[in-house]
Amino acid sequence: MKTLSILLFIILGFLFITVNNSAVAVETINGAEIFQIHCSGCHPNGSNIIRRGKNLRLKTLQRNKLDTLEAITDLVTYGKNNMSAYQEKLTPQEIEAVSHYVLEQANHNWKS
């Protein structure tokens, strides 16, 4: 009985990790697609064609206190200065997905 309980615990743990990682992978894929459609025109590969100093590189995000998922989500939602607000163009889930993608790419120096 004890062995069966341990085996069940291991299987459930594995399923939880697999499902959790799949959700992140799907979110990143959707985030990449959303970024390509809505953001890459001004931010190709994390750059900024309008204001060079407002790129999406990790150092810049840190300097501007935008290096958390919450801060990026807030910026995408409400915009600021030249950055458009997307609260009426994207769903909250899409905003979270693209924000997650931006932070992930910044942490990997925008390398594909």
Image (spheres, helix red, strand yellow):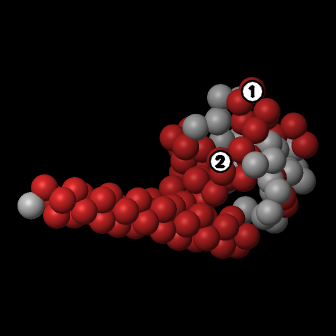
Q: Where is residue 25 in the image (x, y as percent from the top left)?
A: 55, 66
SS class of the residue under badge 2?
A: helix
* Image height of 60 relative to 42, above or below: above
- Looking at the rendered image, the quarter that the C terminus falls into is bottom right
Towards the viewer: 14 or 29 = 14
- Looking at the rendered image, the quarter that the N terminus falls into is bottom left
Disc sitting over residue 103 in the figure: 2
Q: Position of residue 30 (x, y in %)?
A: 58, 71
Using the rendered image of the protein, determine whether residue 90 is visible from the camera's viewpoint.
no
* Image height of 62 relative to 85, above or below: above
2 or 1: tag closer to the N-terminus: 1
Question: Which residue lies at the image location 75% right of the left edge and 26% below the top edge?
Answer: 63
* Image height of 65 relative to 2, above or below: above
Towards the viewer: 48 or 87 = 48
Q: Position of residue 40 (x, y in %)?
A: 78, 64
Residue at the disc numbered 1: 63
Q: Position of residue 91 (x, y in %)?
A: 46, 65
- Alpha-carbon neighbours of circle 1 within 10 Å: few (<14), some, or many (≥20)? few
Question: Which residue lies at the image location 51% right of the left edge and 41% below the top edge?
Answer: 70
Question: Which residue lies at the image location 79% right of the left edge and 34% below the top edge?
Answer: 60
Residue lying furthest left: 1
SS class of the residue under badge 1?
A: helix
Using the rendered image of the protein, determine whether residue 57 is visible from the camera's viewpoint.
yes
The amino acid type, in three-letter code, at marker 2 is Leu
- Alpha-carbon neighbours of circle 2 within 10 Å: few (<14), some, or many (≥20)? many
